[in-house]
């Protein structure tokens, strides 16, 4: 069975494909084989955006679609940038500008607690939807460090770590990431989908 991974962000796509790996009975389809338009992220929550992306793309392509929306929630900023993480410093979605804005807002702030959150959504062309979430707790560094990963990775130090996510190897980030945790909780549903026995929605997020 073909399942579309509904992201056009090449960093996210690479992470999703690495984390999901081979699932018996599923052939992953990406925007490279089946180009699709950008779905505007206008919702008020990660859940809303992830659901909209997955449902619109499933309807458009006729394929079961796995999508996700992620955000960084900073305690001292009341949970911002959250659902607005991509456009924190403006519509150009510039990672460097976003990181610089975050550093400047936290300049002199002692409470650096933050967490990443991913909401993964699986939708079928008939509109049925399943959501699962994963989080990663940590803190915001005082300067950018590392060249791996993407987005806020150079500023995010997971709890119990000394390095930022951008200083870790892809495998090290994958082992603990918010995306990993959300997708692992989605895996049983994907296995069930592939074998024709997916449960009704309504399970725990
Ligand atoms: P979206 O899910 O496409 O809306 O992405 C939100 C933004 O969150 C991205 O543009 C990145 O800046 C940031 N982001 C999402 N996931 C990660 C991650 O794994 N590491 C670092 N930043 C991330």
Image (cartoon, grey):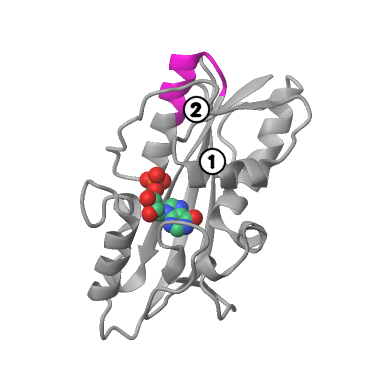
Residue at 74% x, 34% y: name it: 23
136 above or below 4? below
Residue underneath mark 2: 31
Q: Position of residue 123 (x, y in %)?
A: 52, 26
Residue at 67% x, 41% y: name it: 20
Residue 58 magenta-highlighted = yes
Residue at 30% x, 59% y: name it: 81
Q: Position of residue 178 (x, y in %)?
A: 54, 56
Classify mark 1: residues with Cα within 10 Å, few (<14), some (14-19) or many (20+).
Answer: some
The dot on residue 134 is none
Magenta-colored span: 54-64
In primary-sequence order, the first of circles 1 and 2 is 1
Q: Position of residue 90 (x, y in %)?
A: 20, 52
Q: Where does the C terminus fall, quadrant-wise?
A: top right
Q: Is residue 41 left or right of residue 191?
A: left
Residue underneath mark 1: 13
Residue 186 lies in quadrant: top right
């Amino acid at each position: 069975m073909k399942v579309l991974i509904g992201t056009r962000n090449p960093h996210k796509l690479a992470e999703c494909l690495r984390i999901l790996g081979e699932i018996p009975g599923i052939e992953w389809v990406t925007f490279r084989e089946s180009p699709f338009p950008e779905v505007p992220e206008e919702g008020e929550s990660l859940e809303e955006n992830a659901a909209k992306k997955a449902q619109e793309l499933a309807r458009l392509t006729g394929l079961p679609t796995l999508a996700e929306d992620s955000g960084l929630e900073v305690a001292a900023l009341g949970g911002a940038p959250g659902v607005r993480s991509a456009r924190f410093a403006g519509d150009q979605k510039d990672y460097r500008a976003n990181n610089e804005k975050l550093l400047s807002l936290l300049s002199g702030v002692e409470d650096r607690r933050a967490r990443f959150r991913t909401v993964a959504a699986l939708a079928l062309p008939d509109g049925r939807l399943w959501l699962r979430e994963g989080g990663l707790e940590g803190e915001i560094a005082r300067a950018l460090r590392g060249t791996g990963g993407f987005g806020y990775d150079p500023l995010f130090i997971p709890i119990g770590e000394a390095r930022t996510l951008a200083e870790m190897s892809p495998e090290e980030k994958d082992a603990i990431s918010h995306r990993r945790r959300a997708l692992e909780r989605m895996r049983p549903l994907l296995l069930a989908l592939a074998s024709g026995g997916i449960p009704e929605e309504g399970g725990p997020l």
